Image (spheres, rainbow, N blue to C red):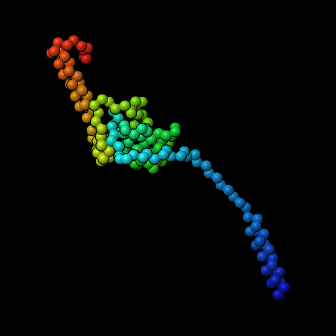
Amino acid sequence: MLRKTLIILCSSFFLFIMISSSSATVNVNIGINVPPPPPPLLLPAPPDVFVIPGTYAYFPPAVDVDIVFYGGYWYRPYQGYWYRSSSYNGKWVHIEEKRLPRHIHDLPPNWRKAPPGQQHIPYGQMKKNWRTWQRDKYWDKHQWKHEEKEHHREYKEHRKQEKHGHKGKNHY
């Protein structure tokens, strides 16, 4: 009986060694091509912004890279990809172009060129009010008033030139 137990024990041990040494190795490799994020922006203070005419998107003219604020997020094109962050100085996360908000995707080609007379908006003011401005269409009303003021200024200048006998180009 002792011999039978010893044979069963040895056989079991041998079988255990055989099974554990012949276990199959399975490798699964899933490749997702996510581009590396852009470098962080090192700004000494939150940047002032301009509103991009015809949109509710904002950009900081003093920052030398393309970043745009819209709908509570910052967007940044970098090396052919788009990135999004909740802060102007990053953590930038890749976003597919098809998931960009329409206003970001359809920015005018010269969106970094601020119209003459446009005022800088302090970062804190933009961060605090962007949602209300967008909801109430603030910039639609403000832009109209700005254009009306500009037109009125040109008219006064024209009248002043006429009054002093200067014959110049007619603005109208």
Q: Position of residue 97 (x, y in %)?
A: 49, 39
Q: How many marks?
A: 0
The quadrant holding residue 35 is top right
Q: Residue furthest left?
A: 163
Front position in the image: 154 or 41: 41
Residue 107 in the image: state x and y as whole percent: 41, 34
Residue 20, above or below 8: above
Location of residue 63 (image quadrant): top left
Left/right of residue 143 with respect to residue 25 in the rendered view: left
Residue furthest bottom in the image: 1
Toward the viewer: 139 or 39?
A: 39
Tell me the residue at 32%/30% (across/down): 115
Horizontal and vertical percent position of residue 45: 35, 47
Which residue: 40% across, 44% down?
A: 74
What residue is shown at x 47% (from left), y 44% (from top)? 83
Give the quarter of the figure containing the C terminus: top left
Query: Relative to 105, is 120 on the left or the right?
Result: left
Instruction: Please state, as top left, top right, bottom left or bottom right, where the N terminus lies in the image.
Output: bottom right
- Depicted 169 relative to depicted 34: above or below: above
Which x, y percent locates residue 53?
33, 33
